[in-house]
Image (spheres, rainbow, N blue to C red):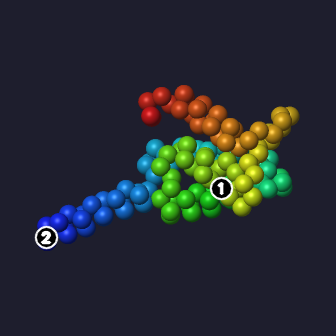
């Protein structure tokens, strides 16, 4: 009986650790790259119908990222793009990115393209 309680407590601790584990260093590095890419892009970012400069957008996404990490929801760079950088949790509208001379694109598409480019340029990191 005592052994089964100890085993149950150990399993509960393992599950809670797995659920609330911080993102891997690789994931953090990739997400940091996406933040820096946005900040230095010179592109505009549309959130809920209003356009923001890239630095303001990056700060907003950082707040969402911090919340998602605290909740244990970031398991990969893709999960951050999907849960935090693709649309408004308030309105459900997709975020848009518009760079000079280009039509607006959904931010999820924009971030995924840069993530693919980053990984292709650094094939040994994955």
Q: Picture quarter containing residue 20?
A: bottom left
Residue beneath label 1, please?
61
- Residue 77 location (% of width, % of height): 53, 45
Measured as percent of width and height from the top left, residue 18 is found at: 37, 56
Q: Closer to the camera, 57 or 107?
A: 107
Residue at image coords 34%, 59%:
15
- Asked if residue 61 lies left or right of residue 124, the reply is right
Which residue sits at x=72%, y=54%? Answer: 92
With respect to residue 46, does 2 lie above or below? below
Q: Secondary structure at mark 1?
A: helix
Residue appearing at x 67%, y 48% in the figure: 86
Image quadrant occupied by the C terminus: top left
Give the image location of residue 16, x and y in percent: 37, 62
Evaluate whether residue 54 shows in this view.
Answer: no
Mark 2 packing: few (<14 Cα in 10 Å), some, or many (20+)? few
Q: Which residue is mark 2?
A: 1
Which of disc 2 and disc 1 is earlier in sequence? Answer: 2
CA separation in Å, label 1 and label 2: 48 Å
Q: Quadrant of the N terminus?
A: bottom left
């Amino acid at each position: 009986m005592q052994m089964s309680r100890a085993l149950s407590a150990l399993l509960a601790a393992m599950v809670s650790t797995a659920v609330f584990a911080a993102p891997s260093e690789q994931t953090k590095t990739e997400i940091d790259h996406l933040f820096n890419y946005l900040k230095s892009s010179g592109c505009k970012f549309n959130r809920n119908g209003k356009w923001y400069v890239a630095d303001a957008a990056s700060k907003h996404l950082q707040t969402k990222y911090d919340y998602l990490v605290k909740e244990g929801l970031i398991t990969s760079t893709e999960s951050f793009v999907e849960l935090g950088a693709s649309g408004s949790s308030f309105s459900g509208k997709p975020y848009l990115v518009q760079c000079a001379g280009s039509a607006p694109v959904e931010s999820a598409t924009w971030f995924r393209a840069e993530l693919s480019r980053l990984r292709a340029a650094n094939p040994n990191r994955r």
